[in-house]
Amino acid sequence: MGKIDIPKKAIYRLSIYHRCLQKLHDNGVDTVSSTTLAKAAGVKSSQLRKDLAYFGQFGTRGLGYPVELLSSIIRETLGREHLQPVILVGAGNLGSALLRYHGFEKEGFEVVAAFDANPEATRARGVTIPVFPDSDLEKFITGNSVKLAILCVPVEFAQAVVNRLVAVGIQGVLNFSPIVLEVTPDVTVNNVDLALELEHLSYFIR
Amino acid sequence: MGKIDIPKKAIYRLSIYHRCLQKLHDNGVDTVSSTTLAKAAGVKSSQLRKDLAYFGQFGTRGLGYPVELLSSIIRETLGREHLQPVILVGAGNLGSALLRYHGFEKEGFEVVAAFDANPEATRARGVTIPVFPDSDLEKFITGNSVKLAILCVPVEFAQAVVNRLVAVGIQGVLNFSPIVLEVTPDVTVNNVDLALELEHLSYFIR
DNA sequence: GCATGTGAAATAATTCACAGCC
DNA sequence: GGCTGTGAATTATTTCACATGC
């Protein structure tokens, strides 16, 4: 790959900049300075300029950045020009909650299918996205070239399921199980660990 | 405070170590080397030793660390010796999903109450935790000395609600809204931004 | 004059490597 | 011999500060 040079944290910030730019665009703004955009994103202006400099030059000195252009360049850099299909595996309490939540769709991801050991029960929970038995996983992923998966299975199954996903081509996993998943370096795992976040907070209160 | 010297990221890792230690303890292990524990936690052994060194010396050279003792020392360091009450504000799709999920309880946090503009609707969604109208927020927080809040209100209300929370003593906020919240430095905000995590993943797939 | 783009400086975090101790 | 604890070295990230260009 040719993008190993952008720091991981900068990539998270790109997403934030992208959101701020969309908001500015909705408000009819078409040029923004690094100072203004940085303030909206909660970072220093120098950091914003450095982050953008990792992948090109888009501003005009004395003026600022073109909102719409920068927005689409970031979208492209993040690989968001084309809609990415996403599957969700494990539609228990949290999984079916996320399916009903539709927070991903709002930001432009399409959750195309869910998988569970007991698909009937999930459908009964008011989930409208198609739910399949988890034995259909491999067939579906291969057939639909899915690259991204949201993993909400119970912690004791998480490693086994991720192995199956990776074997058929999943390259990115959003993992909600409180476990450190072992994957090959070509697979990216992002952990969302709600209890861990609360624990972290509890350190900072007195 | 006297703990400003431990890096933020090290604190997250402490929680992970703590989990691994509990598992080891459950399996009857009573001593563990930095190499073994680090492997379980997915970090380098040198990093584990450095992280622990931030707040003391607990190991025996040639042997390793005492599992139970280290576990309780970490718990104390994180401020988890005593149960912290937590409230949840905004019981819409995601909020009520989290209430039904009970993932926090499993890790030892007690969600004592939820607040929403429409408490009836939330109760109807099968939530068993008490739900109050959001006008009761201040009274409840003050009356029960709550310090931690989970924030799931729609993004356009997030800043206003966090202002109210902070005004009556909330010191830690787990924020699910895709917005950069402005708070005074004595308040800690942790953002869980699901769409942003997916976007981050989409950068790494090809 | 104003705001970008960027080397250089400062700061932070990680990893090495080994002395010290059981 | 094995494993911790820790300074020193390395690597990564952030911030500064200013030359450059509109």
Image (cartoon, coloured by chain):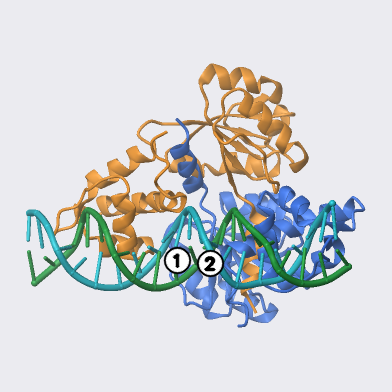
Chain colours: A orange, B blue, C green, D cyan
Q: CA distance from mark 2 to mark 1?
A: 8 Å
**Percent from the top left, x then y, of residue B93?**
57, 49
> In the rendered image, which quarter is residue A82 located in?
top left
- Side (left or right) of B131 relative to A13: right
> In the rendered image, which quarter is residue D20 located in?
bottom left
Which is more N-terminal, label 1 or label 2?
1
Marks 2 and 1 belong to one chain:
yes
A146 up-or-down from A94: above or below: above
Q: Nearer the viewer, residue D3 or B191?
A: D3
Residue A29 visible somewhere in the drawing: no
B159 up-or-down from A56: above or below: below
Hey, which residue is sitting farthest bottom in the picture? B1
Residue B161 visible somewhere in the drawing: yes
Q: Which mark is residue B189?
A: 2
Q: Secondary structure at mark 1?
A: loop
Q: Residue at x 61, y 28 (%)?
A: A166
Classify 10 Å Cα crowding around label 1: few (below 14), some (14-19), many (20 and above): many
Disc 2 marks a residue whose amino acid type is Val
**Percent from the top left, x then y, of residue B36?**
78, 50
Q: Please, which chain is the residue tagged with disc 2 on?
A: B
Q: Residue at x 63, y 28 (%)?
A: A165
Q: Please, which chain is the residue tagged with disc 1 on?
A: B
Disc 1 marks a residue whose amino acid type is Leu
Question: In this figure, which residue is indicated by the disc labeled 1?
Answer: B181
Q: Residue at x 40, y 45 (%)?
A: A5
Q: Secondary structure at mark 2?
A: strand
D16 up-or-down from B23: above or below: below
